[in-house]
């Protein structure tokens, strides 16, 4: 996080901006650690309470186990009251905080294409790490290099709802998308989802759909 004094620099001229150095806020020091072979960037989404939801491929935050999804305070410290109820196969690809503190979480793959086997001459090298949430191709696909084939994977994902403490809400019926959407929390408490999807929850909703404050499809 940048200090407010540093953010104020953006009102200056281009020459002023080049002459000034950005100052980091030393009070915000979250440490994200990933045990996976490939680190995917972590995304931070602000909540109405002034906190941040962080999701990505990390496994620990500030030394505490928090695989894939965590809530941080304004100072970057892990909120111990929030423990996301996710399985080992759950892959978080987007989140949308709701106005009452609950959270919509998008689970599933994002269309990554595994390759198999590794190229000749690179024994023991895993080009794409195995992810149970994405599954493995049955075979076929086009050649991407010597000894390497690829197969596309259906990228169906689903929305689930977590309560204020991160527990899975059993009263919420997951909503399936036939292609991963992007999510945006709206000022009225609803959520906007957009992307290349064609169906949402089995209904025809090409490219754009609004969810209400409970996460249900707005008819």
Image: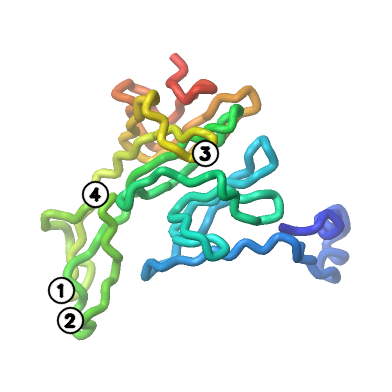
Task: Please give the residue where the numbered disc 3 appears in the rendered image.
Answer: 165
Tag 2 and tag 3, C-beta contact below 8 Å: no
Residue 53 lies, in percent from the top left, at: 57, 46
Helix, strand or loop for disc 3: loop
Residue 172 position within the rendered picture, expressed as x and y whole percent measured from the top left: 39, 25
Circle 2 sits on which residue?
120
- Label 2's element? loop
What mark, if any, has residue 153 been given in the picture?
Answer: 4
Give the image quarter of residue 150: bottom left
Look at 17% across and 70% down and name the residue there.
117
Mark 2 in CB contact with mark 1 (< 8 angstroms): yes
As measured in the structure, the alpha-carbon distance from the residue carrying label 2 to the one carrying label 3 is 48 Å
| For the residues bearing labels 3 and 1, Cβ distance under 8 angstroms | no
Which class describes the residues within 10 Å of circle 1: few (<14), some (14-19), or many (20+)?
few
Q: Which of 37/201 is in front?
A: 37
Q: Residue furthest front?
A: 81
Disc 3 to disc 1, C-alpha distance: 47 Å
Category of crowding for the residue at label 3, using alpha-carbon neighbours closer than 10 angstroms: few (below 14), some (14–19), many (at least 20)? some
Judging by the rendered image, the residue that carries numbered circle 1 is: 147
Depth order, front residue of 132/11: 132
- Which residue lies at the image location 25% right of the left edge and 54% below the top edge? 132
Comes first in the chain, label 2 or label 1: 2
Q: CA distance from mark 4 to mark 3?
A: 33 Å
């Amino acid at each position: 996080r940048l200090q407010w004094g540093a953010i104020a620099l953006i009102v200056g001229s281009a020459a002023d901006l080049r002459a000034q150095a950005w100052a980091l806020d030393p009070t915000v020091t979250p440490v994200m650690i990933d045990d996976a072979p490939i680190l995917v960037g972590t995304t931070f989404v602000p909540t109405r309470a002034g906190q941040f939801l962080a999701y990505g491929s990390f496994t620990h935050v500030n030394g505490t186990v928090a695989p894939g999804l965590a809530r941080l305070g304004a100072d970057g410290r892990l909120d111990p009251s929030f423990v996301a109820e996710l399985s080992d196969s759950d892959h978080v690809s987007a989140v949308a905080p709701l106005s009452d503190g609950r959270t919509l979480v998008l689970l599933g793959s994002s269309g990554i294409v595994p390759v198999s086997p590794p190229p000749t001459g690179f024994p023991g090298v895993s080009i794409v790490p195995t992810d149970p949430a994405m599954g493995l191709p049955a075979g076929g696909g086009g050649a991407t290099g010597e000894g390497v084939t690829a197969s596309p994977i259906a990228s169906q994902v689903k929305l689930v709802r977590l309560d204020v403490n991160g527990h899975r809400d059993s009263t919420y019926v997951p909503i399936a998308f036939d292609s991963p959407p992007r999510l945006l929390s709206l000022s009225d408490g609803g959520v906007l989802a957009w992307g290349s999807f064609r169906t949402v929850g089995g209904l025809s909703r090409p490219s754009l759909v609004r969810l209400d404050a409970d996460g249900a499809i707005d008819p």
